[in-house]
Structures are given as structure tokens and as C-alpha cells.
Image (cartoon, grey):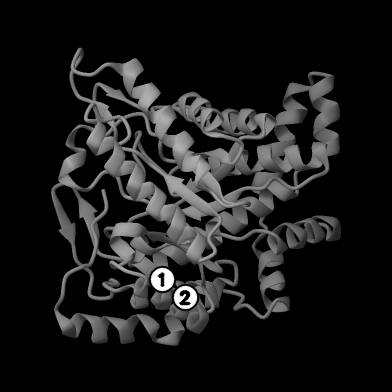
Amino acid sequence: MTDRQAELVWNALDRFRIELPSWGFADTGTRFGKFHQPAAAATIEEKFNDAAEVNRVTGVCPTLALHVLWDFREGASSVAEVDSLATRTGVRTGSINPNVFQDQIYKFGSLGNPDEQIRQAALRHILDSVEIAAAVESRDISLWFADGSNYPGTQNIRHRKAWFEDGLKQAHRALNVGQRLLVEYKPFEPAFYHTDIADWGMALELARAAGPQAKVLVDTGHHYSAQNIEQIVAWLLDCGMLGGFHFNDRRYADDDLTLGSIDPYQVFRIFHEIAVYEWETGKPADIAYMVDQSHNLKPKIEAMIQTVTTAQELFAKAAIVDHAALAVKQKTNALVDAETCLKDAFATDVRPAIGKWRIARGIPARPMTAFRESGYQQRIEAERGAKGRGAASSYA
């Protein structure tokens, strides 16, 4: 690696921040059952503590995404508790995630439900979430909907689209200056005939209908296996509508595998599209990078550290692509040479440069080793396992 490449790596890492999910530290499982780990977090305090430990060894995870039904109690005291924990742990509150899929009333949908009273109940919950976000000084309200139908002819698809537009417009009107709605999409599951927000185009249209403070959230696992996610990213960047990512990986079309565990080259290509956009426009892309993984089998804190360090490596590789040389090769249709620009960067071992960057920033050079040597895992296993309690939340 050249000195110039090392400089590019350092500059990239200085501005790369990754948000952790509170639910990623709790006991989780599949629709067939929940798998318990003795170190799993069962309280909001434990989630903040675990997030702080990941941030201590990585130095790039200053915020924790919270789920309203899983992380907040009734009343204003919950906001005060969260503020207190954020101050004590040094981890700020990140995106606020409403839950309009768990309660029984959402059996046939939330904002897309044919029952107006249920649509209003879902909207009230989203508006409450906007208020919570304002109270904890959170910018982003992240919206994922399980709405859809399982059988042809059972729902009016156009009516449901109109109800979503109306609900999102009302939510948008409640935003404070600087707040954003991030609209997520998913091709299927739990709805198996039609999903109301099934792809990036639907999310884009609904975000545009909601208002200028609404953007699209791309979950890297919410795509079919052959989908070209980096093309979606390029289009959304060009439209000024890419708001953020939920990091994970997938073997088929669902998520929850750790980032880069299946196709690290795809994650690199996604980061490359962002890097070349910033190089061409001369301005940083305003993107929220967030993890959305439930680690059913891997130790939860170790899986978070692995995800963060993998993301850093792939982000650094994208930063050292020679964009000027690539642009020339693209214009002249030098196909082999253009592709080689990407492959050379991807094949470069950026870990030594990242290690030096960490040391210079007062971060352990090898985060996983630092965590394992800290004894934190053994301590919380003993403390939490001795309580013999289950998890405070579920995740599908």
C-alpha cells in the first residue's frame, strides 16, 4: 500500500460512523423459537452498556438505535432514563424505530389496513415515535412495515398505496426541522402475495409523496439473490433520496447474517458507488450507516465487533479506488482495465493501515482481541446468566 492510499484510508475512516441496534444485543431467534444466550441484554441499561463496549474497542459506534415498544416504557420517565444512560455510557440515542407490526391489531396491516381505526392507531404510534425522537434529539425515524397480503384478490392494492401516502404525509408534517423519515422496503415476508412497500421504487415514490424530509432506507438483506444493490444505491444517490443503510447480509432474500459474511465484494461495490459519487460531486453523501442484525448463534457483542471491523475494511478498500483512472477507462470502454481498478482495490490488504489509524486515534489496534482480553463477556455471562431471565424483546 502506498502512502497516498494510506492517507485515503485514514481520511475515510475519520468520517465513517456506524450505528448499533439495541435489539441486536437481546435474545433473538427465528419464527420457530428463540435462542437464549447467557450474556444477552434484557434491559435498556444492558443494551447501552454493551453498545458502549463495542464503541470502546472500535471507536466508531457513537449511537444506539432504539425500538419504541421494546426499549421505552410508558410515560416521560423512559426518555429521562435513556438520556441518563446516554450520558453515563457516552453512547447517544440514534434512530428511533416505531413498531407497527407486532400487536394483534396489525394482522391485516398498519397504515395499509382497510380498517380506518387501525390505520389511525398506527399513525398515532408513529407520531408518538416522532415526539420521542425529538425528546432524545434523534434525527431519524426509521420506518419498516410488514403490511401486505397473502392471497390474490383479498386486498385493494391501490387503496392501500393511497392510505400509505396519506399516513406518511401526516407523519412528515409532524417532523421538526432537521428530522427525517427513512422509508424501508422488503420484497416479501411476512406477506407472501404482495408487500405494500416491496422494492426501492415503491419506497422512493412514497418518500417523495411524504415530503422533502423523507428518504429511502436500503437494507442490504432485503433483496432477491441476484439483485444489483449497488445500482439501486447509485440511482438513489443521483436522485438525492438515499437516507441510510441497514447493514447485514443474506443467502437468499432475507437478512440477519453478519455483514460481508456471504458476499463482501458486493458490500465493497456498494461503498464504491458512494465513494465515486462523492468524488464526482465534491460533497459528502448524507447517509446514516446502521447495523440491523439479530445474532441468533454468534456471541452478540463479538458479532457486532466483527460487523463493524468488516465494514471498516470494505469502506477503506472502496476509498483507495483510483477514481480518476477509472473514469478515463470507463470513457474509453477499456473493460478489463476498468474492472481491474476495482479488483486491485478490493484485493489490497488495508488492515495494516487501519491498525495504525486506530492506534493514532487511541483505539485498540485489534478490537476483537481487546474485547476478549477485557473479560467483559465473562462478567456479563456470569451476572446475567445467574438471573435466569429471558429476553425483553423479540425480533423477526
The quadrant where residue 17 appears: bottom right
The kind of residue tagged 1 is Val
Q: Along the horizontal axis of the image, is 303 left or right of 146?
A: right
Return the x and y of residue 291 as percentages of the image width and height. Answer: 46, 55
Residue pictured at 28% horizontal, 75% vertical: 39
Q: Is residue 195 left or right of residue 356?
A: left
Tag 2: amino acid? Asp
For residue 18, which quarter of the picture?
bottom right
Q: Nearer the viewer, residue 6 or 192?
A: 192
Give the residue at x 40% y 61%: 66
Q: Is residue 225 visible?
A: no
Q: Quadrant of the N terminus?
A: bottom right
Q: Please say if 120 is above or below 369.
A: above
* Residue 390 picture location, percent across and down: 16, 70
- Residue pictured at 26% horizontal, 48% vertical: 396
Q: Who is closer to the viewer here, 180 or 329?
A: 180
Q: Residues within 10 Å of mark 1 (few under 14, many from 20)?
A: some
Q: Would residue 159 be visible to someone looking at this image?
A: yes
View extreme (top): residue: 153
159 above or below 80? above
368 vs 263: above or below: below
Residue 3 picture location, percent across and down: 84, 61
Q: Relative to 292, is 379 on the left or the right?
A: left
Disc 2 crowd, CA 10 A, few/some/many (<14, 14-19, 20+): some
Q: Are marks 2 and 1 in contact (CB under 8 Å)?
A: yes
- Residue 128 is tagged as none
Spatial CA distance of label 2 from label 1 is 6 Å
Q: Which label is found at residue 79? A: 1
Which of the pair 82/168 is nearer the observer? Answer: 168
Task: Name the residue carrying label 2.
Answer: 83
Q: Circle 1 — which element?
A: helix
Secondary structure under the numbered disc 2 in the rendered image: helix
